[in-house]
Amino acid sequence: MEQNKKKGISRLLEFAGNHKILIVLSCVFSGISSVLMLCPFVCLWLVIREILSIMPDISQLHRSEVVFYGWLAVAFSVAGLALYFLALMLSHKAAFRVARNMKAATLKHLSTLPLGFFTQNPSGKLRKIIDENAGQTETFLAHQLPDMIGAFTTPVAIIIFLFVFDWRLGILCLIPLGAGFVTQFKMMSGDAARYMQEVQNASEEMNKEAVEYVRGIPVVKVFQQTVYSFKSFYRSIMNYRENVTAFALSCQWPMSIFSLLVNASFVLLVPFGLFIFGSTADYTDFLVDWLFYILFTPACAMMINKIMYITTFKLMAEDAVSRIDALLNESPLSWPAVPGRIQDTSIAFENVTFSYPDTKSNALENVSFTVPQAATVALVGASGSGKSTVANLVPRFYDVKEGCVRIGGTDVRQLTEHDLMSHIAFVFQNAKLFKMSILENIRAAKPSATEDEVLEAARVARCTDIIQKLPNGIHTVIGKKGVYLSGGEQQRIALARAVLKDAPIIVLDEASAFADAENEHQMQLALEQVTKRKTVLMIAHRLSTIQHVDQILVLDKGYLVEQGTHDALIRQNGYYARMWKEYQKSVSWSIGKEAVSNA
């Protein structure tokens, strides 16, 4: 996928679409407003000049001129506020559209990515990137961008005002303000930008760990592992704290110097002003100008401070856009212009080598095997041997590094998404159910299915007992009013989806991993019926469940080390035979009376 060339604000404006004109108008109105808000200072100066010109005889004061300048100051203020209000209305409308477009574009793009991407990027991380970063850009466009334009317009007007009345006093005021601006620029463009990026990275990691920790609380409480389970979450919190502290400390001295400089105008203005005052011929005019600078300079410092804070928000918004773009730049699966055709439902791995993203070692190394049509093949091996990787490559959750995976004689990369997915049904060890009714959860496999078809699929998957005990039967909403299912029950509902889909190929990734004895028995009965006349690729840790499959593939550290039937592999007395002996010992193990009495 071609990477987006634009970055920062220009990239952000691309998400605005037709609403970009609203952002432009908002910035224009904000800039005009900032100039108008400075004009009351000029009006105040004109009033002071009028008063000083007739001192000490106040009776000669032209009241009409003073009133005029007063109303003029009010008019400038009202006009400035009105334009600023209009600018914010326009920016908010555009900001909401940008956030909407950004989220819609990201979610739409995510739907095109291989399913393996979501294994590498947990939901907590993605939620943080999409929700929080889109929220940051919305806040920036709605509030900070108009203020930033106003803040950068103001210095131009300030420079004009500073040099209109007395260029000597103007230079005295400009020296510390300019030095403060340079200090601010260096502070925001140096280590601060890098530290801010690290803070965002740490925030994503902490968000991901928080989600995983909350999801694992039931298991944590059952096994009394609270302290150990908290370690990963605690490390992410400490990492976030370290990065935030480093960011704050990197700004410590520059911020102190900046604050000192922008508020140091009087250090030059007062002594040098007195020196000039002593050498000038027209004391009254100089005194009036001097008072203007004394009144105006604090406003200048406020504007420079405003620029600093807005620049920080700008950096955050730019970082947020770059993170959204990082998702948008993820390469989707490519689908063939001229698709191939599936001749049968066989599965073949041909010299497949594969490694996961951002890893150096291969998860599979030159693996070749064939699953004939309507055959049942089991994958066994130690944890990390590559079993789940094989299962993930069949439905093309990832693309292989070398070799190819074929279904019906055709490389899966040459099949359309519809053809590939319509031929495969999945039942994974981590069954995912939506917070909706049992009916809608099962119907997700076939949206056009009738309620009778869903009930039949539930019956075949041995879910009848689950449905009967629920308050509203198949219409009961999971997760509502305390209705929850056990792990084994969730897997049976997931199996019902596979039954309803009725695909000719079934991939079972430890389908009964979280089932208790009763649920496992029901799952096995259901699987016997579901897998009839189907091509089945299954992963199982319980070796007793695969004794009668057509073929067993034994994986070890990414290599296919053995293959054959259960009896043939036992006779080989190799890796599988050792696994079988260990399994037999584990199932026959029991606590004797003597051990209990000595406990």
Image: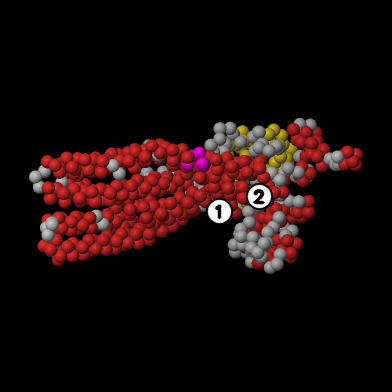
Q: Main secondary structure of the magenta part?
A: helix
Q: Nearer the viewer, residue 434 or 206?
A: 206
> What amino acid is at disc 2?
Ile
The quarter of the rendered structure image containing the N terminus is top left
Secondary structure type for disc 2: helix
Please give the residue where the numbered disc 2 appears in the rendered image. Answer: 217
Q: Is residue 243 magenta?
A: yes
Q: Residues within 10 Å of mark 2 (few under 14, many from 20)?
A: some
Q: Residue at x 84, y 40 (%)?
A: 589
- The circle on residue 418 is 1
Colour mode?
Answer: secondary structure
Question: Which is more foreground, mark 1 or mark 2?
Answer: 2
The quarter of the rendered structure image containing the C terminus is top right
Q: Is residue 39 magenta?
A: no
Q: Nearer the viewer, residue 54 or 213?
A: 54
Distance, label 1 to label 2, CA atoms, is 38 Å
The spot of residue 524 in percent (x, y) is 76, 52
